[in-house]
Image (tube, rainbow, N blue to C red):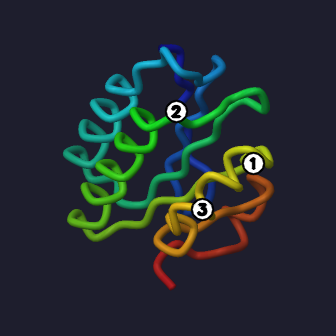
Amino acid sequence: MNIDVYKKGAYLVFRIQEDVGLSTELSDLRKRIEQELSAGARDVAIAFTQSSYLYTKSIAVLIACSEMIKDAGGHLAIVEANKDILDILSVIDFDKMIRIYSAEEELVSSPATT
């Protein structure tokens, strides 16, 4: 899986460069987040492509990542999510457990620790 990782404000952004769908395996994302948490990262933002869609497997990975990040004392955010992803996160109430930002620039203006 092609993932760009870079710092934006207080967050380490994981920008997935390919569409997430039914057959997508997000274990690479989970491993990379684990590695960054081990190296001291705390606040993580994930950005999907505009054509991505979350299914049960990908939602399970996001929940696991959220718990890992929370256990490390950090916060998980989703940035620039499309309507389908926002709808899914809302239906499962995951949008109440994580932060959702419409634009990457909001990561800079919103401290992760509040």
Label 1 or label 3, whichever lies nearer to me, is 3
Q: Position of residue 58 (x, y in %)?
A: 44, 35
User: Tag 2: residue type?
Assistant: Val
Out of 58 and 78, give the one closest to the viewer. Answer: 58
Q: Position of residue 72 (x, y in %)?
A: 23, 63
Q: Reading the chain from its start, which is encountered first: label 3 or label 2? A: 2
Left or right, 2 with respect to 79, comes to left
User: Within the image, what quadrant is residue 111 found in?
Assistant: bottom right
Residue 107 to residue 58: above or below: below
**Separation of disc 3 and disc 2 at Cα?**
28 Å
Q: Reading the chain from its start, which is encountered first: label 1 or label 3? A: 1
Label 3 or label 2, whichever lies nearer to me, is 3
User: Tag 1: residue type?
Assistant: Glu
Dot 1 alpha-carbon crowd within 10 angstroms: few under 14, some 14 to 19, many 20 or more? some
Number of numbered labels in the structure image? 3
Residue assigned mark 1: 80
Mark sitting on residue 5: 2
User: Within the image, what quadrant is residue 39 found in?
Assistant: top left
Q: Reading the chain from its start, which is encountered first: label 2 or label 1? A: 2
**Separation of disc 1 and disc 3 at Cα?**
18 Å
- Which element is circle 3 on? helix
Residue 48 to residue 89: above or below: above
Residue assigned mark 3: 91
- Which element is circle 2 on? strand
Residue at image coords 33%, 49% = 65
Left or right, 44 with respect to 13, comes to left
Residue at image coords 27%, 49% = 37
Out of 5 and 47, give the one closest to the viewer. Answer: 47
**Separation of disc 2 and disc 1 at Cα?**
15 Å
User: Tag 3: residue type?
Assistant: Val
